[in-house]
Image (cartoon, rainbow, N blue to C red):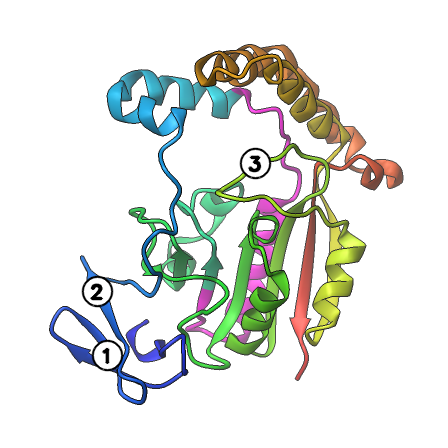
Amino acid sequence: MRPLLVCPGCRGPLADVTGGLRCEPCGAVYPVVSGVPHFAGGGVESGPGFKERLAARAPSIYRAARLGARVLFPVWNTRSVKNLRRLEGEVFAENRSPVVLNAGSGDASGPGMSALSGRFRARMINLDTAVLPAVNLRADVGGIPLADGCVDLVLAKALLEHVPGPDAVIGEFARVLRPGGRVYVEMPWLEGYHGYPGDYRRWTAEETSRVFAGHGFAEAETGIVAGPASAAGLFFREFLGSFFDNPALKFLSKDVIGSVLVFLWRFLDIYLARKKSARVLAAVVYYIGVKGK
């Protein structure tokens, strides 16, 4: 990754200095902490919420609750594994040493990620503003510190609803991708507000395609990741949680009781997500685009 890094402000080359990287043209200095370059300024992360406090104070309880929530989560993901495996094959067919940018990666354990091969994940740059073990490049997606045209594939799973200026972010995707490079987007359509720290929009697959076309991308494929049954389960959980303002009671009613009550609903998407009308009430949609040559 080091040869690909540039200054996010002026795109100038970076020189190694003690404890960090310095931009030769503009003089900006960026720290490197435990081997991770930090291009994101301070104050990005919001304060810890109830779940974070629970994890710190009662880690065993938190781990048990998190495992239960994952098992009982009301979304049946019908496409991520298939889409990501297909993209892996296409990217390796064109370049035996590809560069993959996982933009807004979080802990890099989202749906379908475990299906990727070890050699593919080894080519992945996990970019996020958060300080997490999986993140190997800490930066803002609106100013990606990578050189022009050096990336083969950009993953943007559950990202664009959280950025206040999506055009700037998509413009950065177009800049860092090589001609013919791909972008893969997963975007919620019917899902409750979930701020990390903000939540700004919902796009249909058609709108996602339209916005990316404005940045020089051609649509390769769009479709549904999670269908109407998943959306119904998500909204029912949020409905139960809306009765409480206390974080602990909200967590209990929504994430525990709500998840148990709607657990079986998600399996209906094995059938419903294939229907033509599924896009009307789809929980999550996807878009695959190709940068023009």
Residue 194: mark in rendering: 3
x, y (%) of residue 253? 55, 11
The residue at which mark 2 appears reads as: 32
**Residue placed farthest to the right in the image?**
277
Which residue lies most toward the bottom here?
25
Q: How many marks?
A: 3
Q: Gap between marks 1 and 2, in whole Å?
A: 11 Å
Left or right: 247 in relation to 55: right
Task: State the residue at coordinates (48%, 15%).
Answer: 246
Q: In what quadrant of the picture does the C terminus appear?
A: bottom right
Kindly identify which residue carries mark 1. Answer: 22
From the viewer's side, name the closer residue of 180 and 55. Answer: 55
N-term-proximal mark, 3 vs 1: 1
Q: CA distance from mark 2 to mark 3?
A: 31 Å
Report the span colored magenta. Answer: 72-100
Screen quadrant of the N terminus: bottom left
Question: Looking at the image, is mark 1 or mark 2 nearer the viewer?
Answer: 1
Q: Is residue 188 magenta?
A: no
Q: Give the amino acid at mark 2.
A: Val
Find out whether the residues at labels 2 and 3 contact each other: C-beta distance under 8 Å: no
